[in-house]
Amino acid sequence: MESIENLNFEETIKKLELIVNELEKGNLSLDESVKKFEEGIKLSKLCNEFLNNAEKKINILINNEGKLEEEKFEI
C-alpha cells in the first residue's frame, strides 16, 4: 500500500472516495470496516492539511497605481 505522505490532494480525495464507497456497500467485516474508517479519518485530516496550506499560500494580485502587488488573502 502506498504511503499517504506521498499523495497529492487529488490522489488523497480519490482514495477517500474509494473508502467511502467500500463502507457504503456494507460488504466488509466489522474489523475491515474499522480499519477502512481509520484510514479514511487519516486521509480526511491530510486533505484538511492540504486545504489549510493552500489557503495560507493564496495571494491576490491587485493593481496599485499601475503596478502589480501581492496581497495576502484573508477570509
Image (cartoon, helix red, strand yellow):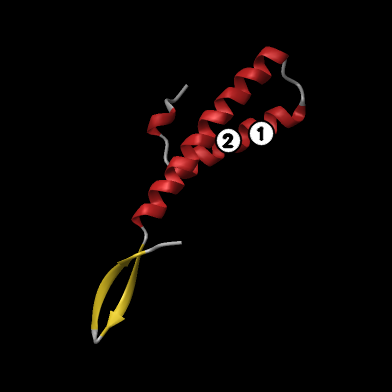
Residue 56 position (above or below residue 42): below
Judge whether 71 appears above or below 52 on screen: below
Work out whether residue 11 can be spotted.
no
Q: Nearer the viewer, residue 59 or 40?
A: 59
Q: Which amino acid does label 2 sit on?
A: Leu
Residue at (43, 47) in percent of width and height: 52
Residue at 65% across, 19% down: 34
Residue 41, how many percent across, how many down?
A: 56, 30
Q: In which quarter of the image is residue 39?
A: top right
Q: What residue type is labelled 1?
A: Val
Most foreground residue, 71 or 68? 71
**Viewer-proximal residue, 46 or 14?**
46
Is 28 left, or right, of 54 in this rendering? right
Spot the residue most to the left.
67
Left or right: residue 15 versus residue 50 is right
Separation (CA) of disc 2 from disc 1:
6 Å
User: What residue is shown at x 42% (from left), y 41% (from top)?
Assistant: 8
The label shown at residue 50 is: none
Could you say whether the residue bearing mark 1 is in a helix, strand or loop? helix
Residue located beneath label 2 in the image: 16
Query: Quick check: marks 2 and 1 in contact, CB under 8 Å?
Result: yes
Q: In this view, does 30 lie above or below 25?
A: above
Which label number is shown at residue 20? 1
Q: Where is residue 61 in the image (x, y as percent from the top left)?
A: 32, 72
Label 2: which secondary element: helix
